[in-house]
Amino acid sequence: MKNNSFSIIITLNLENKSDGIIYVEGEESLEYQNNKYSILKICYEKSEINFDWMLYNYHVNNNIEKIIIFGENNEEYLYNKNEIDIINIKNDKINLEFMTDFDNKKIDIIRLNKYKLTDIQKIIF
């Protein structure tokens, strides 16, 4: 998986919040014992997904393939929106493609593979 794209799955709790951590290291040595790894915290709250690098001691070169959001999500207006914006490191807003599945309470943000995990700061619904 060293250079493979990530698919990120976000599962919301009853308060429509979620957070998790992605840990990345070289996978081929014991350099992680010398703090050669990176940790990314991903949080969903109030119709935003925030990407916060808690530690960046290992160069991460992976792209994001897609993001899938599951959950009760009482914010039903998300299922009727026609655009989602991504804010990258340069503070540019870019419109994203997505699909909604109201019956299964699921949102798929698709075709993200042109973006590196390190390029994204925030996704806003």
Image (spheres, rainbow, N blue to C red):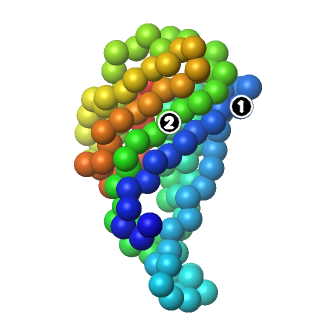
> Which three-letter amino acid code belongs to the residue tagged 2?
Ile
Looking at this rendering, what residue extends furthest in the right direction?
A: 14
Q: Quadrant of the C terminus?
A: top left
Q: Secondary structure at mark 1?
A: loop
Q: Earlier in the sequence, mark 1 or mark 2?
A: 1
Q: Which mark is residue 13?
A: 1
Query: Where does the image place residue 68, in percent across and percent down from the top left?
Result: 50, 36
Query: Where does the image place residue 82, in percent across and percent down from the top left?
Result: 34, 15
**Tag 1: Cα neighbours inside 10 Å, few (<14), some, or many (≥20)?**
few
* Residue found at x 42% / y 70%: 2
* Residue found at x 40% / y 42%: 66
* Residue found at x 26% / y 39%: 92
The image quadrant that residue 32 belongs to is: bottom right
Q: Which mark is residue 39?
A: none
> Which three-letter amino acid code belongs to the residue tagged 1?
Asn
Query: Where does the image place residue 91, in percent across and percent down from the top left?
Result: 30, 42
* Residue found at x 49% / y 19%: 101
Give the residue pinned by disc 2: 68
Query: Where does the image place residue 28, in percent across and percent down from the top left?
Result: 48, 84
**Tag 2: Cα neighbours inside 10 Å, few (<14), some, or many (≥20)?**
some
114 displayed left or right of 50:
left
Compared with residue 93, is residue 72 higher up or lower down, i.e. above or below?
above
